Image (cartoon, grey):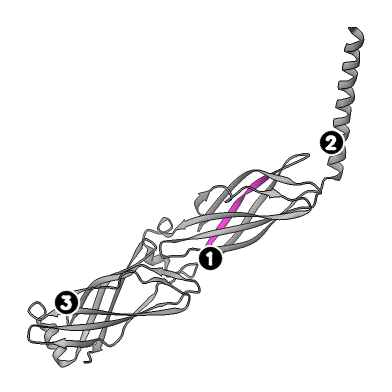
Amino acid sequence: MRRITWMALLGVLLAASGCAALNNLLAGAFKKPRVAFKTAQVESVSLAGATVNLVWTVANPNPIGLMLEDVDYKFSIEGKQLAAGHPRQGLDLPADGRADLDFPVGVQFAELVPALESLFTKEVVAYKAEGSVGIRTPIGVLRFPLVHEGTFPVPRLPQVELATPRITQIGVTGATVEFPLTVTNGNGFPLPVNGLKGALKVAGASVGTLSTGDLGMLEAKSTRQVTLPLRIDFAQALSAANALRTGQATVAFDGALQSGGASVPLRFSEQVRFTR
């Protein structure tokens, strides 16, 4: 019985000595992974917000695979923290290889400023990403900092212009007029325009409401033209009746532009000539 106990104890000591030697061997041969910022991608932009996807590349110079252990991550814009979270998916580092670590952050512009119109006067906003990642290795969990600062573009409001209205029908009691609108996306990225809607005045008289409906996605640097017919009742808009008969008047629009759930005031007033 005593002999078996001493042999078991000797085995434990030898095993412990072997593990220590193995750990020392791994510590000497193991190479530290490298973490470097790769790119920032701005996606799904609207007047309501955008998705900012920040990507880091993690390189593993070792002949064995490694795994992501944990993440501590924060994202702020103009000094205001908007998100703290985790990558879109976990990370497995292949042996002698590299992998990308993606952090998508949804940005709601209403969280940055009380009035969206003031934000759209800027060209860019500054952001900061900071935190750390822990990578599981044969010598324990190693931590690496994640720090990057940059800017991303603020969408500019689409330009809306009124072309020459055309009188398609006129009579004693009223007229039907087509109002052509040109909507231009001057941004370098696509922008959804979910509609324009507002009250219209001709020669100071309220004549009705113009509504485009959903215009869909406007491609970068592109223009969309829509023509909106409107029936004008002369009994309710006498000054508009006189203007249409003379062929010239001031046309004013007071409404809003919708994009991605945001509604931004839109107003314009132009002196125009009416054609037939």
**Mark 2 Cα shell of 10 Å, populated few (<14), some (14-19), many (≥20):** some
Q: Which residue is located at x 18 percent, y 91 percent?
A: 247
Using the image, determine if residue 28 lies above or below residue 240.
above
- Tell me which numbered mark, 2 or 3, is placed earlier along the sequence: 2
Q: Which residue is mark 2?
A: 23
Seen from the viewer's position, the closer of residues 199 and 177 is 177
The answer for how far apart the CA atoms under marks 2 and 1 are is 46 Å
- Tell me which numbered mark, 3 or 1, is placed earlier along the sequence: 1
The answer for how far apart the CA atoms under marks 3 and 1 are is 42 Å
**Mark 3 Cα shell of 10 Å, populated few (<14), some (14-19), many (≥20):** many
Does the magenta stretch mainly form a helix, a strand or a loop? Answer: strand
Seen from the viewer's position, the closer of residues 68 and 160 is 68
Q: Which residue is located at x 82 percent, y 45 percent?
A: 30
Quarter residue 120 falls in: bottom left
Residue 133 sits inside the magenta stretch = yes
Q: Which residue is mark 1?
A: 152
**Left or right: 189 with respect to 131?**
left
**Left or right: 165 with respect to 58?**
left
Q: Which residue is mark 3?
A: 207
Q: Which residue is located at x 7 percent, y 83 percent?
A: 173
Residue segment shown in magenta: 126-135
**Left or right: 60 with respect to 209?**
right
